[in-house]
Amino acid sequence: MEMEDDGYVQKDDEHYKVCHNDYNPIVENIKLAIQLVYLILSAIFMIRVIYVVGWKCRTTFRNNSFFNIFLIDCFVGLLLILSSIFFYRPIMYIPQICAYISHVLLFDFPIFLDVYQPIFRYLQAFQILIQMLSVANRASCVLVPVSYAKFWRKNWRRMIIIVGMVTFIWVWNLAVSEKLLRHAYGGLVISFNKRIGFGLLLLLIDIFIARFFVYFPQLCQSASHFFQSHRLIMDVYYPLLNYLHCAQPLIQIFLTTNRASSVLWPVEHNKKWARKLPFIIAFVSLSPILFIWNTIVSTKIIVYYFGGFFIIGVETISWADVNVFLFVIRSMTVGVTVISTTVMFKGMSKMKNRMKKSEKVLCVASAINSVCFMVPSFFEALAFFSEVYGNSWINFLVQPFAWDVLNVGHVLTEK
């Protein structure tokens, strides 16, 4: 199958046996052997822990909420380790079976990718949340020693169910997205082509929550009462909305630098980005918290406009206004976009066979993209620096349309 520029192997390719041959198979096999040593030892240790806590001494531990949570954590960890031992690491570090495995996964059993990858990522996300719950359990033992045992004995099962449901928020997009095979270290790793991006999530939130309750006065009284009676929804919705707004320009920064680097280092481009991809995902996922933390701790209120209502936050810390942070991030995005586009344009102009039509499209798309990010940034900054405008009905009317310019416009330019 014909390799694409991003290194992915797809079903409609013709020469599926084409795997990377620039890795020494023996060296990759040795890497696998070293990793299998500690993975197998870890699996044996976890099996022993599960046997002791969950079976041999179950009468001692079964009434202790911490050990029940710990047992679930160990079981999930064991599943992840076994997955790495028997599948994930072997297909990555055994180049000798790369062509055969890629054919089997893409043509003989394509449903395996659709099932395995969501489950694997679900377990990873579930494990993180379970460990957070375990830490909270230990902390509450010290903070509220009197009511600790009674509270956790009553609620730990309910919390496990909630954690299991919340985890779907992290992986649902992966479940509905197209699964791909990506060449790495002479072998394969499973990736996916994200079907629903942050921009689409913002549009869906706008359609079904923000705009819906603004322009349906018939629902104003009942819906506003519902939100005020269930404040947890507002406490989740408002920070989530701002989280997505922060993540969107950060992703755009990496998209433009990715394209620029493909022109500067065409040979090493895929390998360099493959090594940095886990860091990039972690950075984009976690860094928005640095900008929206004030929206998490702030009081959420309902503001009535146009016969409907908005949900906004009253900042606890006045200087940490999320609108200013968004203005800074989006301005940086525009700057990076312009610089990256200039680099790409210069690199393309020096090619022997110039693609003038592509250069023209690139410049136009870059200009439109920059405008898409600058429009909401301008109005958000105006609302922050001008108190009169920020509290006026014009601000609440214009700002959603400014977001539309970004959410819709920049996606169209990417296409």
Image (spheres, rainbow, N blue to C red):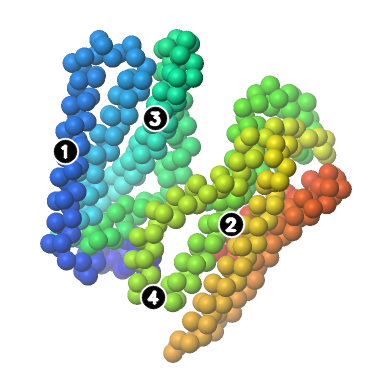
- Residue lying furthest bottom: 352
Mark 1 neighbour class, 10 Å CA radius: few under 14, some 14 to 19, many 20 or more: few
| Point 63% across, 32% down: residue | 235
| Label 4 – label 2 distance at C-alpha | 25 Å
Tag of residue 368: none
Residue located beneath label 3 in the image: 130
| Point 32% across, 29% down: residue | 73
Given residues 299 and 199, the one toward you in this image is 299
Residue located beneath label 2 in the image: 249
CB-based contact (under 8 Å), mark 2 and mark 3: no
Give the residue type that dot 1 points to.
Leu
| Point 19% across, 22% down: residue | 51
Residue located beneath label 1 in the image: 41
Image: 79 above or below 343: above
| Label 4 – label 3 distance at C-alpha | 42 Å
Image quadrant in which you'd find residue 76: top left
Residue located beneath label 4 in the image: 266
Mark closest to the chain's N terminus, 4 or 1 = 1
Mark 3 neighbour class, 10 Å CA radius: few under 14, some 14 to 19, many 20 or more: many
Image: 33 above or below 260: above
Q: Position of residue 32 (x, y in %)?
A: 17, 52
Q: Position of residue 332 (x, y in %)?
A: 61, 62
Mark closest to the chain's N terminus, 3 or 1 = 1
